[in-house]
Image: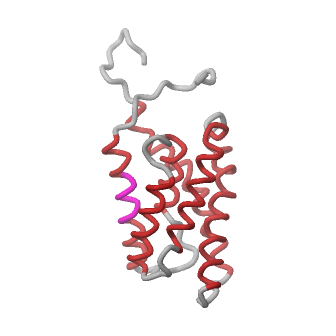
Amino acid sequence: MIMRQGQQLLLPANPLFVWGSLLAAMLCDMFLNMGLTGRAAWVPDLLAVVLVFWTVHQPQRVGIGAAFVFGLLMDVHQGALLGQNALAYTVLSFFAVTIQRRLLWFPVPLQALQVLPLFIAAHVVEVSLRLLAGGAFAGFWMLLSPLLETLLWPLASIALLAPQRRAPDPDANRPL
């Protein structure tokens, strides 16, 4: 792949870091569901943000299958309709793979604008399934969740790419 001028060469991603960050995001989502906010509709889905990030940056490691498994785990934790989060995460991951090559050419703020429709689509799938199963509408506060997830995209980019930006053996003669 041809790199943009001024773009930093990244080290390969450590698979333990990739999967560890996904597990940490899942645990954070679980704690947010059990914490003070409960199951508030406006709370951003951290697992969805990290899942899209790694699906875009490491599609050979994290893909639709991983999204489905994490979705099933979240369904079991939330006591939701089995497959509700799994389908939403699968759709999210599919769309992330679809725009993956194009997305990496943009700077991070523009990437955030381009992943906003993905987060909206995932929430539409989740709410539609909930309503089809006879669940209650969560209210219009749920529109805030995809916006908050989009605002988390630059923070996720900084935090999750940080281990890849360091030099393997830094010295004065090797700036990479």
Residue 25 belongs to the span the image colors magenta: yes
- Percent across and percent down for residue 155 are 51, 50
Q: Nearer the viewer, residue 107 or 67?
A: 67
Q: Quadrant of residue 106?
A: top right
- Percent across and percent down for residue 128 are 65, 77
Q: Is residue 10 left or right of residue 24?
A: right
143 shown above or below 26: below
Q: Residue at x 48, y 43 (%)?
A: 158
Report the residue that reaches farthest toward the top.
Answer: 173
Magenta stretch in the rendered image: 21-27
Q: Residue at x 55, y 67 (%)?
A: 87
- Percent across and percent down for residue 17 are 34, 45
Q: Quadrant of residue 159?
A: top left
Residue 160 belongs to the span the image colors magenta: no
Q: Nearer the viewer, residue 83 or 18?
A: 83
Q: How many marks?
A: 0
Q: Is residue 138 left or right of residue 25?
A: right
Q: Is residue 7 left or right of residue 30?
A: right
Say which quadrant the N terminus sits in. Answer: top right
Q: Residue at x 48, y 47 (%)?
A: 54
Main SS, magenta residues:
helix
Q: Quadrant of residue 173?
A: top left
Q: Residue at x 59, y 73 (%)?
A: 126
